[in-house]
C-alpha cells in the first residue's frame, strides 16, 4: 500500500535540519526588498521565482547569500521565522531545532543582537502557535576559524536563546577539524553540537569519522556517505547519533535523493530523520520530503512512522518529552487506522 501525502502531512514530526535563511519565499523577499529599499534585481514574484534555479551547491549558494540583503532589522528576522513556523504548523511539525547563520548578516553590517533577537521573537510567536521551536547557531565553514570564534564570543550573552551550534556552507577545503577549538568550547558550556557532512564531498568519509570521533557531535546533518564504512555505521547505531537527511535538497545538488543510503541506514537501526533544509528554494516543505522519499523508494507507512519517531528521538529534548511526542504519533496512527 502506498503512503498518502495527507497521512504524512498529519503525522506529528520534528524538523531538525532547516536553515531559517532558506525559508525566504519570493513573496517575503520582495516585500522586504521594497520596505528596506534593497535592489535585488527583480521586481515581480515571477522574476524572483525564476531566479531560484540551481543544479549544484555552488550555484545555489550564489543565489542564497545575496538574497539575505533584504533582512535588515529585528522585525525582518522575526517575520522570516514566523512565516516558516506557520508552514511548520501546517505540516504538523510539533518541535523544531532551526539553523541560523549569524555571520551571513554580521559580515554585511547587521549587528549580532539584531539577528538573534529578531529570530527569537519569531520563536516565541511560534511557541504560542503550538510549535516548540529552538535555535541552532551555525558557523559558516568557508569563513575563518577566527571568525567563528568571534561569533561564539558575540553569542555569550544570548546562550539562553541558543540550543546548539552547527557548521554549514561550502565543505570543500573546510574540514570539520578547522573548527575543533570553538566546538570544544561550546561542548564545555553544555551547548549541543551538530555539523554538516555534505553529500559526496572530497574525503566525505574522513570528515564523518572526524565529526564522530574527534569533534564528538550528537547529530550529523546529511552524512549518508557513512554507508561507505560499516564500522562507523555500527558506532552511530550504538551511540544513537542521529542523521538529518534532506532528500529533495539532495536531488537538487547531487544526482539523486540518496534514498538508498537512507533506507539502508534505517534498516540498520540508525536514527535517520527527514527534513526540508532550504524549503523556499527547493519548493518542498517537510511533508513533501517525506512523500518524495516514500514514493520513490516504496517505503511503507510503518517506515515513515519510524522516521517520524526518529525525529523526536534524535532531537535535543528530554526523555519525557520524547515519550510524549511518540505517544502523540501512536495516537494519530490509531485514529487514522480506526
Ligand atoms: Zn543544511
Image: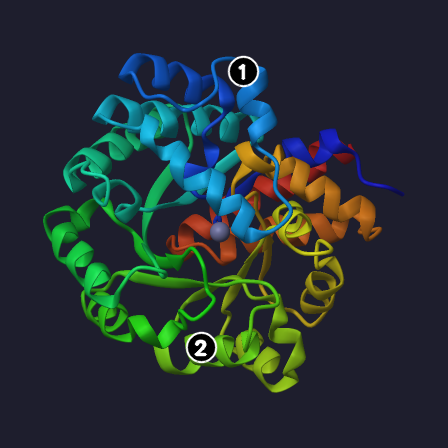
In this view, 92 is above or below 214: above
Which of 20/315 is in front?
20
Nearer-N-terminus badge (2/1): 1
Residue sitting farthest toward the left:
157
* Image quarter of residue 271: bottom right
- Mark 2 or 1, closer to the camera: 1
From the image, tell me which residue sits under label 2: 212
The residue at 65%/83% (across/down) is: 230
Residue 65 percent across, percent down from the top left: 40, 41
The mark found on residue 45 in the picture is 1
Label 2 secondary element:
helix
Residue 278 percent across, percent down from the top left: 52, 41
The residue at 69%/36% (across/down) is: 8
Horizontal arrangement in the rendering, residue 53 relative to residue 165 (left or right) = right
Which of 95/298 is in front?
298
The residue at 19%/70% (across/down) is: 185
Residue 23 percent across, percent down from the top left: 47, 33
Horizontal arrangement in the rendering, residue 52 relative to residue 137 (left or right) = right
Q: Is residue 145 visible?
A: yes
* Image quarter of residue 237: bottom right
Horizontal arrangement in the rendering, residue 241 relative to residue 148 (left or right) = right
User: Badge 1 local density, few (<14 within 10 Å), some, or many (20+)?
Assistant: some
Residue 77 percent across, percent down from the top left: 30, 29
Which of 251/192 is in front?
251
The residue at 61%/67% (across/down) is: 200
Amino acid at each position: 500500500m502506498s503512503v498518502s501525502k495527507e497521512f504524512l502531512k498529519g503525522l506529528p514530526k520534528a524538523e531538525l535540519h532547516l536553515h531559517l535563511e532558506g525559508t525566504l519565499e519570493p513573496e517575503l523577499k520582495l516585500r522586504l526588498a521594497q520596505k528596506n529599499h534593497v535592489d535585488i534585481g527583480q521586481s515581480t514574484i515571477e522574476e524572483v521565482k525564476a531566479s531560484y534555479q540551481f543544479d549544484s551547491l555552488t550555484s545555489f549558494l550564489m543565489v542564497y547569500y545575496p538574497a539575505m540583503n533584504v533582512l535588515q532589522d529585528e522585525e525582518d528576522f522575526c517575520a522570516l521565522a514566523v512565516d516558516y513556523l506557520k508552514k511548520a504548523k501546517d505540516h504538523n511539525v510539533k518541535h523544531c531545532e532551526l539553523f541560523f547563520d549569524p555571520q551571513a548578516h554580521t559580515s554585511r553590517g547587521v549587528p549580532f543582537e539584531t539577528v538573534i533577537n529578531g529570530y527569537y521573537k519569531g520563536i516565541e510567536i511560534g511557541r504560542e502557535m503550538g510549535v516548540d521551536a529552538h535555535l541552532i547557531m551555525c558557523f559558516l565553514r568557508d569563513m575563518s576559524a577566527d571568525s567563528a570564534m568571534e561569533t561564539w564570543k558575540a553569542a555569550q550573552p544570548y546562550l539562553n536563546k541558543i540550543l546548539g551550534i552547527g557548521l554549514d556552507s561550502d565543505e570543500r577545503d573546510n574540514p570539520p577539524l578547522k573548527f575543533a577549538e570553538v566546538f570544544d568550547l561550546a561542548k564545555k558550556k553544555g551547548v549541543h553540537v551538530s555539523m554538516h557532512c555534505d553529500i559526496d564531498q572530497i574525503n566525505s568519509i574522513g570528515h564523518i569519522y572526524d565529526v564522530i570521533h574527534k569533534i564528538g557531535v550528537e547529530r550529523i546533518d546529511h552524512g549518508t556517505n557513512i554507508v561507505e564504512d560499516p564500522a562507523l555505521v555500527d558506532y552511530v547505531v550504538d551511540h544513537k547519533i542521529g542523521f538529518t537527511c534532506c532528500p529533495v535538497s539532495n536531488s537538487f545538488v547531487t544526482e539523486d535523493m540518496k534514498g538508498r543510503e537512507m533506507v539502508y541506514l534505517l534498516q540498520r537501526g540508525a536514527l535517520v530523520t527527514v527534513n526540508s533544509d532550504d524549503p523556499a528554494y527547493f519548493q518542498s516543505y517537510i511533508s513533501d520530503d517525506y512523500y518524495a522519499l516514500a514514493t520513490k523508494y516504496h517505503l511503507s507507512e510503518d517506515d515513515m512512522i519510524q522516521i517520524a519517531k526518529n525525529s523526536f528521538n534524535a532531537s535535543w529534548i528530554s526523555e519525557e518529552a520524547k515519550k510524549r511526542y511518540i505517544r502523540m504519533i501512536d495516537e494519530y496512527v490509531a485514529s487514522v487506522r480506526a
